[in-house]
Amino acid sequence: MKGTLALGRIAGVRVGVHWSVLVILVLVTLALAQGRLPDNHPGYSAAAYWGVALVTAVVFLASLLAHELAHAVVARRNHVEVEDITLWMLGGVARLRDEASSPRAELRIAGVGPLTSAVLGALFVGLFLWLDRLSVPRLLAEAVGWLAAVNVLLAVFNSLPAAPLDGGRLLRAFLWWRSGDRLKAALGATAAGRFVGWLLVLLGFASVLLGGDLSGLWLALIGWFMIVTATEEGQQAQLRSTLSGVPVRQVMTPHPATVPATATVEDFLAHLPTGHYRHTAFPVLASADLDGAPVGLVSVTQIDRVPADRRATTTLGDIMSPLADVATALPDTPVVKLLPLLESGAGRRALVISPTTGSLLGIVSRSDISRTVSWLTAGAAHQP
């Protein structure tokens, strides 16, 4: 997700915050500081309302992070690699590199999220009841009560049997167990997600138009997000099914044009426009030796950012994305395992490396995968 600030690693998982988190932070703080807190407990200073509201909003975001971390931890225990966790305006998302190997694993990974929110809700309820017996400011108890309610609400909402919610994955696990068909199960969860999404959109607009409640726009936004994300999940499921069993070697572009790390930007541009450099990203080798091991990837965008007066002294090695930031694969790696790496890797491309010599064998882009899918789909359509 673009515009994400990395926070580091928790339990070995990369965690980031999207800039849109500021939106939810501001909305929650405003709603509490100018609404719920002064309405229910008048008489405190403005600083007290704003201070308690801000801390409550931060704890709420921490609750969302705990929900996603629970998914990540259980996924790793079920041998599913976790790409990262990102908090954003509509909550959080844990990106998984692989799919669960069985309906039971899918059930565990999906179910732990709502369970975590429910446990947090119960803990906040207990804390609220304890604070209620003590001589503490009622403002603090009110904030804890709000956190209890919102975590219980998250647990209930996420349990709805509709993609992309956790309940949708629970539904997918059940349908997968019943039918034995992973794709059919995924499409069933997608259909449920689209239905619930459109229902939320209609309810949201009805609330605005008939009741004058502007908060209905938020409900409509959540519904639209569900529609879009559920549709994408269905498309990804179909894509994975089509590419099942296809190795990277059948998809890659072999012997791609390469550039040496020692070449200057000026040298590179001097060869344009030629057929040799018609692509927009190039594997970078340590030297001009065509059989060398790649050390990175450089894109036309990175080259274009170099000021004209520095192109004669700036080498491609200076501006390239290092190999550690580039997706790599072996020729026999299943393409479905490469898909999530392409989304997060530099240049949205993967370099195919020889398992014996470490030399470059090919490159894979999204267009390579799209072309392969088109051929596979066309071939399947003509089978008797």
Image: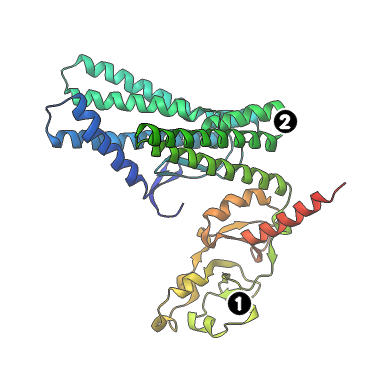
Q: Is residue 288 above or below residue 149?
A: below
Residue in view at x 54 percent, y 85 percent:
270
Q: Position of residue 298 (x, y in %)?
A: 52, 69
Between 132 and 358, the one lying in front of the other is 132
Tell me the kind of residue under disc 2: Gly
Mark 1, residue position: 277
- Which residue is at 64% across, 78% downward? 276
Residue farthest to the right, as pictured: 384
Q: Is residue 381 left or right of residue 59?
A: right
Q: Residue furthest top?
A: 133
Q: Position of residue 73 (x, y in %)?
A: 49, 35
> Measuring 51% from the left and 39% from the top, which residue is drawn there?
226
Q: Earlier in the sequence, mark 1 or mark 2?
A: 2
Q: Secondary structure at mark 1?
A: helix
The quarter holding residue 318 reads: bottom left
Q: Is residue 265 above or below residue 243?
A: below
Dot 1 and dot 2 residues touching (CB under 8 Å) = no
- Find disc 2 in the rendering and name its residue: 180
